[in-house]
């Protein structure tokens, strides 16, 4: 049985940190949870009440609502391995070797410029 | 003052916390953030909530409470004891919580950089929702525990305090301290919200807790300096007692009132002044309570209202004593001319006593007030608290134009003074000494009017007796010296004449 992941990312407007977090979590989801996740990005400047209900203080905050247990990860999510631990997700074993994957990921690490570009597309 | 200069001045927001606005020179600096630092149990949360509560109740100003420590449910419950119905205000849209309290088992993993943008957005949202003029954040220490990166938290708090300033709200933030006298706050919070700092203290002194408030700084505006005692009263909250800030500008009265004893009135040049403070000093059993009783009877017989605070004897004892001297307290009480309040001094701290006494005085509106005895109160406090109590009470009753009679018990049987007197004697307008005089194996009693501000008075030391009708003042002890110093000596008439001749030059009315 495949669990569906419901993830919510709370960000504040168009800051570099928000952008980086959004890019990072999209990438992680595509790599690790492809086809079995739902990602909602919430801008607390536009919807402060949602932040109030969820008692969010820091941004960016990523919340894994499902499957249980509920998990929170704070920050721009720049370290994939830590994010996976934080969300309680077993890393997907890549067909390529571990070393290769790590190298690829380093190349993928997002710059501020990229984050802004991503935002302009949003 | 020119308009330009006026605009530069920092205006103050009247908080409504009793006594505080006086210390603060009108209130908290408007549109700014004030740090309130204090140790555990120094009433930080109370003052933070009260700041908002007074705004809602007295100025119809909305308030936002940001809680980092206790849950809103806990705060609503804890504060209901002060008659602050937060839940009602919330439904009326005058009060909002921003709940930033930690939840059990809610620990987030930190991956990379973050800020507290969501918290700021929530505060802004809440301020907008209730149209808040006041914001309180309690307490900053807890947020440093939630987020390990103090540098980020510090920076974010600075950002929040600047944002609050832009919103034009007046804010208080509370922070923990480790010691009563030491660093301003843990985590060095004062360095970034340092415009205004207030320190709350809860010092243990001779086994007693004493709460004080000090305004350490108000940048660019004035305030009273030093520590001021305050009390946390059930049903009311914090009441600050601005003692040394009191001004000596009471009106004086020329109207005389009776002491309840005709002979004593004569000695005082026609009675006490209507708004004077009278101190009766004497050893135990010299007749202080009798003088109090006569003072009250004298007032009640003239249709005045009298209030008696008794800290040594019970109601029954006082009433029985009065009956023994031919005075009917019960009848006076029924006629509404007398109110007797008996309490052990130990039941409360002096600050609390003072506030309660002021409340009773305000409610009952007496013309005369007697406290029997001040020495009993001195027993339960430190010297500093006692002095503040005496000044606070006497200035209050003077302001209300009430005659006050206070008794003080001297520690030794013969002669002597007590600490009570050293604190009150300069404030007292009249001082009457009651002394034992030992002569030929017999204890007799002497009375003298030591001081009578603004009036001529009898300077003799007169003998008095007590019987079923009260006090009777008789002739002066002409041939005895050394009564006041506690070692009376019989003087031979020849010696008296010789000494009399020495002072002939100064003879006459003093």
Image: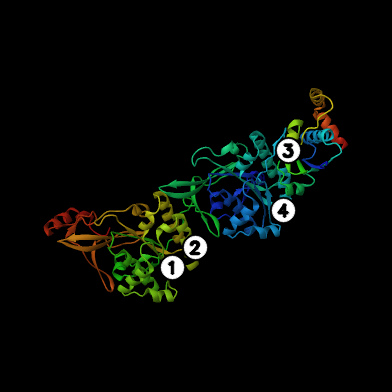
In x, y percent, where is residue B134?
Answer: 66, 50
The crowd level at tag 2 (other Cα within 10 Å; few <14, some 14-19, many 20+) is few
Foreground of the two, B52 or A59: A59
Mark 1–mark 3 Cα distance, whole angstroms, equals: 69 Å
* Mark 2, residue position: B359
The kind of secondary structure element at disc 1 is loop
Q: Is the residue at mark 2 from the same chain as the one at mark 3?
A: no
Does label 2 or label 1 sit earlier along the sequence? Answer: 2
The kind of secondary structure element at disc 3 is strand
In x, y percent, where is residue B207?
Answer: 41, 49
The kind of secondary structure element at disc 2 is helix
Residue B367 circle label: 1
* Mark 3, residue position: A73
Res. B27 visible in picture = yes
Point 62% across, 53% down: residue: B74
Mark 1–mark 4 Cα distance, whole angstroms, equals: 47 Å
User: Is B73 left, or right, of B346 in this rendering?
Assistant: right
Q: Is the residue at mark 1 from the same chain as the one at mark 4?
A: yes
Foreground of the two, A10 or B384: A10
Q: Is the residue at mark 4 from the same chain as the one at mark 3?
A: no
Foreground of the two, B43 or B262: B43
Res. B258 visible in picture = no
**Residues at badges 1 and 4 in contact (C-beta under 8 Å)?**
no
Mark 4–mark 2 Cα distance, whole angstroms, equals: 35 Å
Does label 1 or label 4 sit earlier along the sequence? Answer: 4
What subunit carries mark 3? Answer: A
What subunit carries mark 4? Answer: B
* Mark 4, residue position: B131
């Amino acid at each position: 049985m495949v669990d569906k992941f419901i993830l919510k990312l709370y960000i504040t407007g168009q800051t570099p940190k928000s952008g980086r977090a959004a890019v990072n979590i999209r990438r992680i989801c595509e790599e690790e949870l492809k086809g079995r996740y739902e990602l909602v990005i919430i801008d607390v400047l536009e919807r402060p009440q949602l932040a109030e209900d969820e008692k969010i203080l820091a941004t960016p905050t990523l919340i894994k609502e499902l499957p249980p247990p509920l998990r929170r990860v704070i920050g721009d999510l720049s370290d994939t391995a830590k994010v996976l631990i934080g969300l309680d997700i077993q890393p997907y074993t890549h067909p390529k070797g571990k070393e290769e994957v790590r190298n690829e990921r380093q190349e993928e690490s997002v710059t501020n410029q990229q984050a802004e570009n991503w935002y302009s597309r949003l | 003052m020119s308009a330009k200069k006026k605009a530069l001045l920092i205006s103050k927001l009247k908080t409504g916390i009793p006594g505080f606005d006086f210390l603060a020179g009108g209130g908290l600096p408007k549109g700014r953030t004030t740090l309130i630092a204090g140790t555990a149990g120094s009433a930080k949360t109370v003052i933070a909530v009260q700041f908002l509560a007074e705004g809602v109740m007295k100025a119809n100003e909305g308030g936002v409470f940001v809680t980092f420590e206790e849950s809103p449910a806990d705060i609503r419950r804890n504060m209901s004891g002060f008659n602050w119905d937060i839940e009602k205000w919330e439904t009326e849209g005058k009060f909002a919580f921003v709940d930033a309290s930690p939840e059990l088992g809610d620990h987030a993993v930190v991956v990379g950089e973050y800020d507290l943008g969501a918290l700021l957005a929530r505060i802004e949202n809440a301020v907008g929702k209730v149209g808040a003029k006041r914001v309180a954040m309690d307490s900053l220490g807890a947020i440093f525990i939630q987020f390990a990166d103090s540098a980020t938290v510090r920076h974010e708090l600075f950002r929040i305090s600047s944002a609050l300033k832009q919103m034009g709200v007046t804010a208080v933030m509370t922070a923990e301290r480790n010691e009563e006298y030491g660093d301003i706050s843990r985590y060095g919070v004062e360095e970034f919200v340092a415009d205004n700092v207030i320190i709350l203290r809860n010092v243990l002194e001779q086994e007693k807790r004493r709460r004080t408030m000090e305004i350490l700084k108000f940048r660019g505006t004035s305030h009273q300096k030093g520590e001021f005692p305050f009390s946390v009263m059930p049903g009311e909250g914090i009441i600050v007692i601005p003692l040394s800030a009191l001004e000596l500008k009471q009106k004086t009265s020329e109207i005389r009132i009776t002491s309840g004893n005709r002979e004593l009135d004569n000695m005082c040049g026609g009675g006490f002044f209507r708004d004077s403070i009278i101190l009766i000093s004497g050893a135990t059993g010299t007749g202080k309570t009798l003088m109090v009783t006569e003072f009250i009877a004298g007032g009640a017989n003239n249709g005045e209202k009298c209030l008696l605070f008794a800290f040594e004897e019970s109601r029954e004892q006082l009433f029985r004593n009065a009956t023994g001297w031919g005075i009917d307290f019960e009848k006076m009480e029924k006629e509404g001319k007398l109110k007797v309040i008996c309490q052990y001094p130990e039941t409360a701290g002096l600050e609390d006593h003072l506030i309660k006494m002021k409340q009773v005085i305000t409610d009952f509106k007496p013309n005369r007030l007697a406290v029997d005895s001040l020495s009993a109160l001195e027993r339960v406090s430190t010297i500093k608290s006692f002095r503040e109590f005496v000044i606070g009470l006497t200035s209050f009753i003077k302001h209300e134009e009430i005659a006050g009679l206070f008794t003080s018990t001297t520690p030794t049987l013969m002669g002597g003074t007590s600490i009570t007197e050293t604190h009150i004697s300069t404030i007292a307008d009249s001082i009457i000494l009651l002394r034992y005089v030992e002569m030929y194996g017999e204890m007799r009693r002497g009375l003298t009017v030591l001081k009578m501000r603004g009036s001529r008075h009898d300077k003799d030391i007169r003998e008095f007796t007590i019987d079923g009708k009260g006090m009777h003042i008789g002739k002066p002890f002409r041939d005895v010296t050394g009564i006041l110093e506690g070692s009376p000596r019989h003087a031979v008439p020849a010696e008296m004449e010789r000494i009399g001749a020495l002072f002939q030059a100064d003879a006459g009315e003093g």
